[in-house]
Image (cartoon, grey):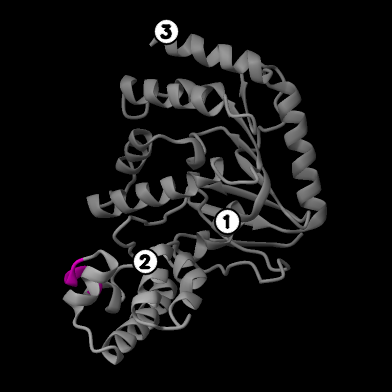
Amino acid sequence: MTELRGTAAGDEEAPDADGSGAVVSLGDGWESHDGGGRRPEDDAGRGVVIAFGHTMKTLRLREGLDRDTFGRAIGYSAATVASYEQGRRIPSCRTIDKSDEVLHAAGLLSVWKDEVERAQYPVFFQGMAALEKEAIELLSYSALVFNGLVQTVEYMKALLAMRRPPLDQETIDLRVTSRLARQDIFDRRPAPLLSFVIAEAVLRHRYGGKEVLRGQLEHLLLIGQKQHVELQVMPLECEDNAGVNGPFTVVTRKDGKKFVYAEAQGIGSLQTDPEQTVLAAARYGIIRSQALSPRESMNFIEGLLASL
């Protein structure tokens, strides 16, 4: 079996460019992202961002622009420009392209986009984040909490607030906005095929309170109406469940290669072994057959919502 495991310390590596590597950890995605700039989460990402910042500063000085003038040209303050150049924040891809244009860099900044974007994620999640962006099919079984791709902001904040040791507010805010960025998968064209099987216990657990759960269930109903999304519920009364070993996600890339991501107690693994990925996909098929149908599941969620 091809597999790498890791902890929150981030001792894994991202998949090789040809997809032959194995990786990654912590599937609920400790990322950070906001419109004005993201914060690198670990030393590996910080090194990339610092190098990018030095390049930006060198090009800015070559053009004879101070930070204030340059900032106005790209739509940000001088303080934000300073944070970019010092590697304390990560600009969006759009900001990088705009900076490249303003500084007449002829692509010297834009070429950094992929590496800088990856730096918003800690090393242990970069592989999975990249796969989500490339997925033509994503199959997710949730047994403890909702998959981050379907979580509402309020639900995210409730989960992150319960972390022990506790997270500071800035870290919570950064991780929330980054997780929201991953949800672009629902609007991508061509649309990937997305399937989520959710254990009933997840639907009933009132993390953050009744109103948070109400908003989360309403959000699920909206997601379930998308043509390329199927939501199913695994009811508590079901006597058979092939997912008893816990939550996992199967991702298929355009080249047909499958990956299986699983996590428990802050430790995650991304398997690339063909035998294991095929078995996981087959296991997911069994889980889907044991769960309520999509239509029955939507009715079930509507019933839970009405009972709150």
Residue 264 vs residue 134, the one in the foreground: 134
Q: Position of residue 224 (x, y in %)?
A: 57, 25
Give the left or right position of residue 38, taking residue 124 as reference: left
Say if residue 276 shows up in the picture: yes
Residue 113 vs residue 281, the one in the foreground: 113
Say if residue 165 shows up in the picture: no
Residues in magenta, as a range: 77-81
Quadrant hosting residue 253: bottom right
Residue at the spot of label 2: 95
- Amino acid type for the residue under numbered disc 2: Thr
Q: Position of residue 76 (x, y in %)?
A: 23, 65
Q: CA distance from mark 3 to mark 2?
A: 46 Å
Picture layout, residue 157 above or below residue 21: above
Indicate which disc, 2 or 1, sits on the residue closer to the N terminus. Answer: 2
Residue at the spot of label 1: 128
Q: What is the crowding at mark 2: few (fewer than 14 residues within 10 Å), some, or many (at least 20)?
A: some
Report how many numbered discs are placed on residues in the image.
3
Give the left or right position of residue 208, taking residue 72 as reference: right
**Are dots 3 and 2 in contact, CB under 8 Å?**
no
Residue at the spot of label 3: 307
- Amino acid type for the residue under numbered disc 3: Ser
Give the left or right position of residue 134, taking residue 219 as reference: right
- Quarter of the image that includes the C terminus: top left
Quadrant hosting residue 64: bottom left
